[in-house]
Image (cartoon, rainbow, N blue to C red):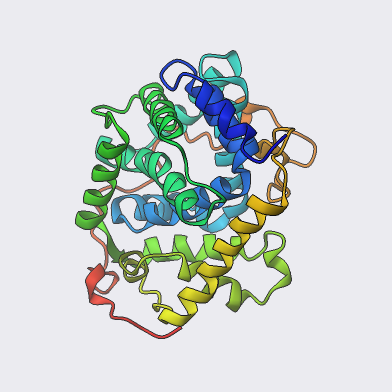
Amino acid sequence: MNRFALRDRTDSLDAVTQYEDIVRILTTQEFPWDITQALSFALFRTYAVPSIGVLLHETREFNERTQKRYDDTVLVLDAILEHGIASPVGHSAFRRMNQMHGAYAISNDDMRYVLSTFAVCPIRWVGEFGWRPFTSNEVEAWTHYYREMGRHMGIQDIPKTHADFVAYLDGYEAKHFAFDARGQAVADSTLELLTTFPPSHLAPKKLVKLFARTLMEDALLDAFHYPRPSALTRKVFRSALQLRGKFVRYALPPREVPKFGRESVNLRTYPKGYVVEELGTFPKTCPVHHHRPAPAEDVAPASAQGAGGS
């Protein structure tokens, strides 16, 4: 296939009725590495919203079983992508996801925000680091896919267009990003996990974590009280990713065989296989103490953290 064969295929499909096919091609063939990275870093954004970060900390899942929590998330979403939203496997995956979310008092606004990170962050990542940006048809399909995902999750007032998702994401972050030591602890655990993924596991952890910080905006870094990398450090690491995109464009052919999330070497919890219905956690009641005020020293506005060195 020529380098643009998959783009031509997605643009030949109807974004309104064939959005699952388009998203499947984008995720498993056209941009599998980029979209995986984008969604991994999208996780950090959710931790910076205290109502989400604190909840994740108090469940202990992201702190004590970080690998399993990561794997479960990937596999549940992967089952929906591979088999289809309306398939029996897709229904089982949604049921599992909704059972887990339903055990906690999560606001519709927070659910809608997390959905927005999935709808927006991969498009932004690919636009900056991918070998080409999404086409307008692909953006529309991506939006329809996550609107349908949100509907199956019972989320209300889902943004209607990509621009609506962007406005909601940016507005929510501007209003809600703030420091909380518990959200920071969840981010720390996830950063530690990222250092174990190939090929990052071959590099010094300090370097991997610095690289990760160069991909976070100042507002996100401030929400975790992470030091801001220098402008030069950001330029070096981000330019490296952009060079990778050029290499993919000019040196690699399109992927002819889809690569699903379940095939990733980063997933290590289920070496003997798994059943979708058994993924995740099964809390009988919500294990989180709600409305418990955070210790005064643990909470501060995100803007309280100034710029630091790399």
Q: Is residue 20 left or right of residue 177?
A: right
Q: Residue at x 60, y 61 (%)?
A: 194
Looking at the rendered image, the quarter that the N terminus falls into is top right
Give how far across and how far down residue 225 sits, in percent. 35, 74
Q: Is residue 24 above or below residue 261?
A: above
Give how far across and how far down residue 287 sits, in percent. 41, 43
Q: Which of 297/38 is in front?
A: 38
Asked if residue 229 shows in the view, the reply is yes
Q: Looking at this rendering, what residue extends furthest in the right direction? A: 272
Q: Looking at this rendering, what residue extends furthest in the bottom direction? A: 309
In the rendered picture of this protein, how many numbered marks are placed on residues? 0
Q: Residue at x 62, y 60 (%)?
A: 244
Give how far across and how far down residue 185 sits, in percent. 44, 65
Give how far across and how far down residue 6 sits, in percent. 62, 32
Q: Which of 260/291 is in front?
A: 260
Q: Residue at x 32, y 48 (%)?
A: 289
Q: Is residue 100 above or below residue 40?
A: above
Q: Is residue 286 left or right of residue 64?
A: left
Q: Which of 300/139 is in front?
A: 139
User: To which quarter of the image does residue 47 belong?
Assistant: bottom left
Asked if residue 61 shows in the view, the reply is no
User: To which quarter of the image does residue 224 belong?
Assistant: bottom left
Q: Is residue 280 left or right of residue 217?
A: right
Q: Which of 74/82 is in front?
A: 82
